[in-house]
Image (tube, rainbow, N blue to C red):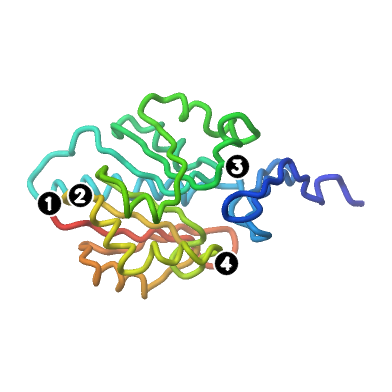
Amino acid sequence: MSTPYDIPEVLDRREGPYGEVVLRRHGSLLQIIANGCFLMDTSDGRSERRLVDAALAALDAADTGEGLGPRPGPHVLIGGLGVGFSLAHAAAQPRWGHITVVEREPAIIGWHREGPLAGLSARALADPRAEIVEADLVAFVNETSATFDALCLDIDNGPDWTVTEDNEGLYSPDGLASCARVLRPRGVLAVWSAKPSPEFEGTLRNAGFQQVRTEEIPVARGVPDVVHIGVRPG
């Protein structure tokens, strides 16, 4: 016998600057759909949290390797708000001195500030260290004068599978050069991906990043999620 939860319930549907964005409820899960393509849901969050943890661990390792202690109050830039797992996890860590989230979809920001996703991010958004910037991340890293200790990028589905064509530029040599430009010496770039990408490891090295490695996060079915790590030279 079917139940009402077999069919996702559309909670909000908006036409944004990059197309249609939909928030759905499917049973206990909240789902974000962009232009008909599933992006993410609230089912897990392990890999999004690991994105933040891996960046902080690599940052500490890079500083220790230079004979320095952990840098005080590092500033992390999170690319993509999503369902808020990365933001909430960063805000739960006292080590971060400032947390900037860049999100280009006003609908997603609104769902967190006063909509169904507020339950996941309200505490983090109330944290004085946290701020949300409504901007396209590619344009942001090209134009900002700010610098960061760590960049945690969760844009689209990763380097090899982007829903939005414009996002491909972020993972190109020019895009990675922009990421390196806004990183402080020994700063860390951490990139979430829905699947491993040996080719992207090579692209990171060619862009000048050091200590390049990939962490796998097992998922219930299919290939693991991964976090690609690279360190800007000191």
- Gap in angstroms between the C-alphas marked 2 and 3: 37 Å
For badge 2, the amino acid type reads Ala
Foreground residue among 226 and 35 = 35
Q: Amino acid at mark 1?
A: Gly
Which circle's residue, 3 or 4, is located before the other in the chain? 3
Q: Position of residue 221 (x, y in %)?
A: 60, 63
Q: Secondary structure at mark 4?
A: loop
Cβ atoms under marks 4 and 1 closer than 8 Å = no
Q: Are marks 1 and 2 in contact (CB under 8 Å)?
A: yes
Whichever of callouts 2 and 4 sits on the residue coming sooner in the sequence is 2
Residue that carries the numbered disc 4 in the rendered image: 222
Q: CB atoms at circles 1 and 3 under 8 Å apart? A: no
Q: In this rendering, is residue 144 above or below 114?
A: below
Single out the mark in the foreground, 3 or 4. 3
Residue sitting at the far right: 1
Disc 4 marks a residue whose amino acid type is Gly
Residue beneath disc 3: 107
Count neighbours of disc 1 (C-alpha within 10 A) and say few if under 14, some if 14 to 19, many if 20 or more: few
**Mark seen at residue 65:** 1
